[in-house]
Amino acid sequence: MPLDPVARFRRFARAATAELGALDQSFLGRGRPLGTARMLNAIGRGQGNLADIRAHLGLDSGLASRLLRSLEEEGLVETVRHPGDGRRRVLRLTAAGREEFAAYERLSDDRAARLLAGRADAEALLAAMDRVALALGRQHAEIVEADPQGAEARHCLGEYYTELGRRLAQGFDVNLSCDPQAADMTPPRGSFLVALSDGLPAGCVGVKRGKGAEAEIKRLWVDPLTRGAGLARRLMAAAEARARDLGIGVLRLDTNSALPEAVALYRREGWTEIPRFNDDPYPDIFFEKRL
Amino acid sequence: MPLDPVARFRRFARAATAELGALDQSFLGRGRPLGTARMLNAIGRGQGNLADIRAHLGLDSGLASRLLRSLEEEGLVETVRHPGDGRRRVLRLTAAGREEFAAYERLSDDRAARLLAGRADAEALLAAMDRVALALGRQHAEIVEADPQGAEARHCLGEYYTELGRRLAQGFDVNLSCDPQAADMTPPRGSFLVALSDGLPAGCVGVKRGKGAEAEIKRLWVDPLTRGAGLARRLMAAAEARARDLGIGVLRLDTNSALPEAVALYRREGWTEIPRFNDDPYPDIFFEKRL
DNA sequence: CTGGAAATCTGACCTAGGTCAGGAAAAACA
DNA sequence: TGTTTTTCCTGACCTAGGTCAGATTTCCAG
């Protein structure tokens, strides 16, 4: 007796609206209108550019200007001339502003912690939330360069190894594979890119410089929940662009035919198959692309 | 490399806020302010009582009055005196109002259908949404009397049988058990109660009248995702109250010790164990309660 | 150096939403 | 019967949010 999918979706929408509406309301507890609080939040998250904030929050320029003014009058935000462009203003929290921002963060964290506390099935609930969040926010992931030994990278690589172990017939042991050196994937030699969906890692790719001018794509991975939205393609495009910036003329990569969606992606994106170029035990198919 | 639970929750909150905020915005497309649209919606869902709507939408009496006036002026709603209490007014959609209400419903349905369409993992996504919706909206389930052969009841009973089959060592086959007659669980003989979480069934219980004055509790079931919020207790309390209304003085029930949480619930709620009173092959433990 | 474009600000104005005090009508109660 | 309570309505008023036209300052291309 399956339930109507549309009704299920709408039940979800109503429950989430009610819950998250209450979350919005809780922001009003600090005696500041919601619009002002949202702008403070955006600045606190490092958005220093008024135009970006306007676009992000969907505000009219007049309104944005007034909200900013009121934050300045409260002493929470200070503005300085943009060094390169005198028309712009760069926004920054004052000490008091950082304090206030932290108070808002605490409100959200407490609420989240309270909702999760004392639930035996918290992990299952979080997994469900991840799935929904990634499904709703698929397109919004942003790709940034990251430290290949940082927390985001370690999360992605851990998931990558786990998945390889599950999908390769012979399993996967990092120690048997040629694990790239971090320095080879750090500028100016190479690069490591992470896709962040709302600040949490959702995918990665490395550009690893070898001896001399040769370079390889390594460790392409996308969170299973996010697949199907073209994120792998975006990661590859970003990696190629970054490689070009680093003066790399030819990229190579190795992969395994047990990963057909990856092989199909490479073919689709203009990679050409070449003979084996290393003695790593795991790959069985090799590609090259001239930039 | 597990991610921070609070960060995961907040990613979910942000994604859902953005998505569902857009959903709210879409209601503005029909040229009516949100408050008015919400009131139209509440009336369309059968809320005919102004005070209830005020409470439900959290409106001031003055504001509610004005919103209602504007719907009347548009010719979407008509009010008549409450038959028993001349101070009250009963609200009802006109033909034009029903048309408009249907248009809003279609907006929501289309949006839901569009988001689900073309997703290979739609069922997994819906399951995740169910889990989140039930976790967030646990407390809101309402208990109503239903036709034991209606769609909600059939859904609950199907899930109930499946779960019994999984949990009883010998499996479960409805045909071997004494399946209650629908008429015995329909007023005035008995009753069948369904818990609805946002309109979708989340649990059920039956009061089945036997020959003469004896009566039994049957088919107590709560959706696994909703468990832990006391819904089973509420269902039992509602069933007992309904039984009392129907003039029943003593209730009995049978269950199985492979369902320890049910047995614990009965003991906690004041039921006393009695000897076997039927020859059904599945139960192995029997209870009674005087009302 | 000059005219157009970009980034922001200012003032005027509007709507939606919300609060409050009090009024009218009906019901409940003593 | 008269008094109190309940239900809803009305008018006055306020705030947050949003729009628009035009001003100011700066940048940039020619």
Image: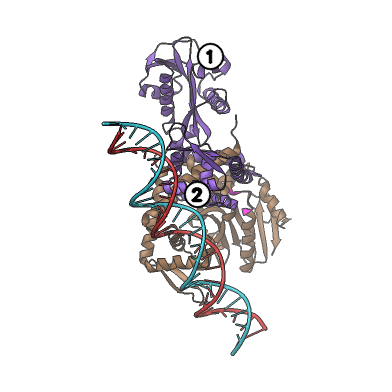
Chain colours: A brown, B purple, C cyan, D red
Crowding at mark 2 (Cα within 10 Å: few <14, some 14-19, many 20+): some
Residue A146 in view, yes or no: no
Q: What span is in magenta? A: A226-231
Q: Nearer the viewer, residue B72 or B220?
A: B72
Identify the image quadrant of residue A28: bottom left
Q: Main secondary structure of the magenta part?
A: loop
Residue A50's label in the rendered image is none
Q: CA distance from mark 2 to mark 1?
A: 51 Å
Q: Secondary structure at mark 1?
A: loop
Residue B176 in view, yes or no: yes
Residue B178's label in the rendered image is 1
The percent coordinates of residue B91 (x first, y second) are 51, 39
Residue B264 lies within the magenta run: no
The quadrant in which the C terminus of chain A is found is bottom right
Give the answer, above or below, for where B137 lies relative to B6. Answer: above
Q: Residue at x 65, y 55 (%)?
A: A233
User: Which kind of residue does numbered mark 2 sit on?
Assistant: Gly
Q: Nearer the viewer, mark 2 or mark 1?
A: 2
Identify the image quadrant of residue B257: top left
User: Which kind of residue does numbered mark 1 sit on?
Assistant: Cys
